[in-house]
Image (spheres, rainbow, N blue to C red):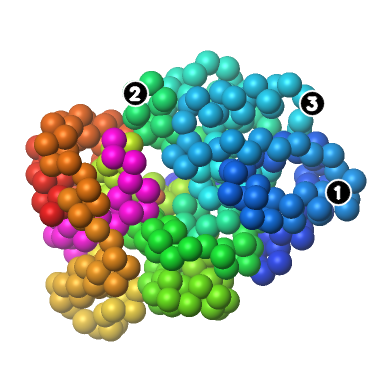
């Protein structure tokens, strides 16, 4: 079997790596960035730190700071108009996955025209657009290294998955110091998102020896540090491990794909505006229980990588420990059920067929070790509700 791996050309990783921004642009021959960010990053001082570095290197810049969580086609259209209005040669995305995903959408539409919907999986993206330098400020999505973007269609509310080389950033700056001020809920939700990436990449039908190492490494880093990062936001070692885990998990799932959890998570996020990591967390224990019988040894490896099972313990009992740990983690991090989150039961039930069909259409469930039918997906949605 041959695998084709996609990664950024350049990555600067470590505390203070933000300072590498001007040098990194120079090495790539880029001189005129449009910065893509959100109003919080624009106000909290992080944007200013980035622009001061650019000013110091006499690199002219402009800012598009209207990105929203769960990026929409409407916001991307505004961003593309700004991108076309001047002679920018690259995008510098500063923020969480939403800002990075917005920049990806802008780059794709700039180079290819049409609408975001034209490029949803499994459609190809013909041309790569302006290069993207991604600077994550959360330890979660891994979008700084992935060939995916997720964009909500402003007309239908559907969360569309768009994939291809054109979506992979050219460079990433992975600086855990930018995450030190992340609030508890964001730390927990984004952390569980990256744990889900690592587990799904490892059990995916498209996993390879290359992605396996990255995924196991990420699981170890995240599982051993997520509680500390939540309890002690200023704990630099925990923040550094979470950031590295998130990026490493991103490298794994970008090249092995995610699976059923993400497939089912996107419709919950789209219809009920649940943050992405939280909707993953709501699903992760039950989906793992559903899927594990089809890949017991792989899930047992996850338990070992996360440090909840000893080497040599049988797969069945290791998987039981994995399920315990995932449920305990949700308890410890106060992850609500859809019901406790306030999602209306009637509307949830009404939408289940649409949610199941969107989940299947995304292609992610087909990578799961146990591929569910539409009815089984609906049943799983029902099971997690309370
Ligand atoms: Fe995710």
Residue 248 visible (yes or no) = no
Q: For the point 66% across and 35% down, which residue is it?
A: 64
| Residue at mark 3 to residue at mark 2: CA–CA distance | 33 Å
Quarter assignment of residue 301 = bottom left
| Residue at mark 2 to residue at mark 1: CA–CA distance | 41 Å
| Residue at mark 3 to residue at mark 1: CA–CA distance | 18 Å
Upstream in the sequence, badge 3 or badge 2?
A: 3
**Element carrying mark 3:** loop
Quarter assignment of residue 108 = top right
| Residue with the mark numbered 1 | 55
Instruction: Please tell me whether mark 3 or mark 2 is closer to you in this view.
Output: 2
Which label was assigned to residue 145? none
| Residue with the mark numbered 2 | 156
**Element carrying mark 2:** loop
| Residue with the mark numbered 3 | 87
| The C terminus sits in image quarter | bottom left
**111 vs 150: above or below:** above
In magenta, the rendered stretch is 271-298
Q: Nearer the viewer, residue 79 or 142?
A: 79
Q: Position of residue 74 (x, y in %)?
A: 50, 25
């Amino acid at each position: 079997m041959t695998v084709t791996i996609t990664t950024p050309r350049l990555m600067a990783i470590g505390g203070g790596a933000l300072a590498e921004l001007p040098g990194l642009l120079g090495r790539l021959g880029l001189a005129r960035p449009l910065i893509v960010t959100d109003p919080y990053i624009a106000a909290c001082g992080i944007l200013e730190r980035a622009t001061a570095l650019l000013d110091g290197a006499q690199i002219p810049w402009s800012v598009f700071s209207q990105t929203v969580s769960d990026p929409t086609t409407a916001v991307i259209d505004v961003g593309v108009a700004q991108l076309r209005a001047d002679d920018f040669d690259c995008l510098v995305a500063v923020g969480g996955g939403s800002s990075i995903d917005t920049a990806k959408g802008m780059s794709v539409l700039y180079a290819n025209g049409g609408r975001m919907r034209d490029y949803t999986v499994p459609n190809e993206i013909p041309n790569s657009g302006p290069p993207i330098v991604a600077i994550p400020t959360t330890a979660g999505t891994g979008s700084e290294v992935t060939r995916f973007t997720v964009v909500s269609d402003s007309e239908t509310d559907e969360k569309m998955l768009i994939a291809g080389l054109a979506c992979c950033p050219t460079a990433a700056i992975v600086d855990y110091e930018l995450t030190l001020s992340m609030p508890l809920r964001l730390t927990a939700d984004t952390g569980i998102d990256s744990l889900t990436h690592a587990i799904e990449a490892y059990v995916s039908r498209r996993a390879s020896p290359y992605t396996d190492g990255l995924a196991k490494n990420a699981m170890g880093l995240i599982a051993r540090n997520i509680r500390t990062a939540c309890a002690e936001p200023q704990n630099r070692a925990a923040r550094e491990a979470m950031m590295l885990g998130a990026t490493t998990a991103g490298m794994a799932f970008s090249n092995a794909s995610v699976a059923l959890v993400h497939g089912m998570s996107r419709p919950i996020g789209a219809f009920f505006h649940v943050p992405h990591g939280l909707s993953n967390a709501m699903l992760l224990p039950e989906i793992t229980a559903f899927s594990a019988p089809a890949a017991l040894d792989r899930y047992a490896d996850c338990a070992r990588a996360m440090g909840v099972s000893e080497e040599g313990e049988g797969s069945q009992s290791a998987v039981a420990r994995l399920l315990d740990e995932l449920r305990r983690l949700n308890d410890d991090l106060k992850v609500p059920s859809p019901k406790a989150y306030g999602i209306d039961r009637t509307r949830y039930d009404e939408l289940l067929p649409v949610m199941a069909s969107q989940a299947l259409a995304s292609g992610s469930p087909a990578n799961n070790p146990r591929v569910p039918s539409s009815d089984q997906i609906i049943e799983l949605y029902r099971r997690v509700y309370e």
